Image: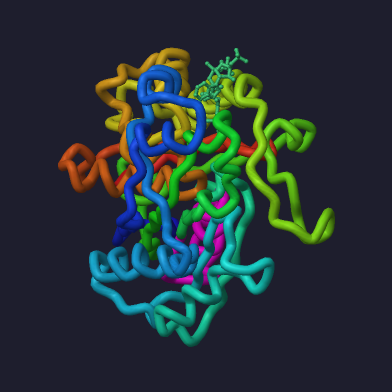
Amino acid sequence: MTLRSRIIGIGSYLPSHISTNDDMAKIVDTSDEWIVERTGIKVRHFADEQMSSSVMATYAAQEALKAAGISGNDLDLIVLGTVTPDKTFPATAVYVQSALGMKHGCAFDVVAACSGFLYALKTADNMIRLGQVKTALVVGVETLSKITDFKDRNTCVLFGDGAGCVVLQAQEVQGTTADRGIIDTLIYSDGSYAPELCSTGGPSTNHDVGYITMNGREVFRHAAVNMAQVSAEILQKNGVDLSEVDWLVPHQANIRILEATAKRLGIPMEKVISTVDLHANTSAASIPLALAQGIKEGKIKEGQLLLLPGMGAGFTWGASLIRL
Ligand code: COA
């Protein structure tokens, strides 16, 4: 027998304000046709001035805790992935800890951009497997609209705000791929690509949080290759055939990246959860938001095998293999 992290609750939150492509065309020189054709994005949600990342994360967490049938104080750990923290410090996770009434354990952030949820998941899963914690909340949350340059048409149409999370709990299992829980997670980074997608600012650089800047073509080229490669690697490592995977739940950056990843991997688009049309790119929040949406739509069901690849600034990338 071995310890595995089982997902016992999932939650999500999207701010109520929706901006259409036509709304974006009133701000920059763009059009609904261009955005839909190049990205698949139709709408995105934007947080208002008062809505911080920790507030959105707390709403998502409350939904996940309710689904799990536990309270905030039953959590031993919060790991939160974001590039849009409430403040430079302390971690956004401690605000969520306080809002949930969690009085023990620890809460911290990880910064891995669009791979942030996978990095957070791997961290929490490792602590559960080692027996250090029993119950953990893993969050991906972003208020990207607050670091978006709304004068730059190359970036401002691509991003949205939102939060998604899962509650993990330690369970004794045999340790096979038939057992429910997180089977494996692989994470990678290559810092030589940092300039291709980054913020123009930072506390120790220019005392400023900066705006998103990106070499779109270079990111695009690497995204599909890296997500397909790491997906194939995690399947091979765990002796799983692609045909056994029920759903690919990838990071949602661009429908063309999703299609290229699926094609390279050899999985049909019918098995790919796509929410990029509704959410745009919500960075660390995109995978758990897609997971929650897939469940709400009745596509993803308990016991199914899920493959979650992601790729983002750093570059960072990774994949998780989960029996829900
Ligand atoms: N509306 C209209 N035109 C736009 C535009 C917009 N919102 N944004 C860029 N353009 C223009 C460019 O200025 C360029 O014009 P030019 O040829 O006169 O210079 C033209 O469209 C084509 O640009 P190009 O970069 O070739 O487009 P593309 O097909 O590569 O698509 C992206 C651009 C950004 C959609 C695409 O590269 C992409 O999705 N990259 C990955 C982005 C991403 O997901 N990043 C986060 C990953 S985690």
Viewer-nearest residue: 178 or 168: 168
Which residue is drawn at the image coordinates 47% and 32% (left, top)? 253
Going by the picture, which residue comes out furthest to the right? 205
Instruction: Please state the quadrant of the image where ligand 1 appears.
Output: top right
Q: Is residue 266 above or below residue 196?
A: above
Q: Is residue 64 above or below residue 307?
A: below
Viewer-nearest residue: 217 or 22: 22
Going by the picture, which residue comes out furthest to the bottom? 103
Q: Position of residue 286 (x, y in %)?
A: 43, 44
Q: Position of residue 16 (x, y in %)?
A: 30, 56
Q: Is residue 84 left or right of residue 240?
A: right
Residue 265 falls in image quadrant? top left
Q: Position of residue 30 (x, y in %)?
A: 46, 26
Which residue is drawn at the image coordinates 49% and 63% (left, top)? 53
Q: Is residue 77 above or below residue 188?
A: below
Q: Is residue 129 visible?
A: yes
Q: Is residue 23 left or right of residue 193?
A: left
The N terminus lies in quadrant: bottom left
Q: Is residue 88 left or right of residue 116?
A: right
Residue segment shown in magenta: 119-138
Q: Is residue 271 left or right of residue 187?
A: left
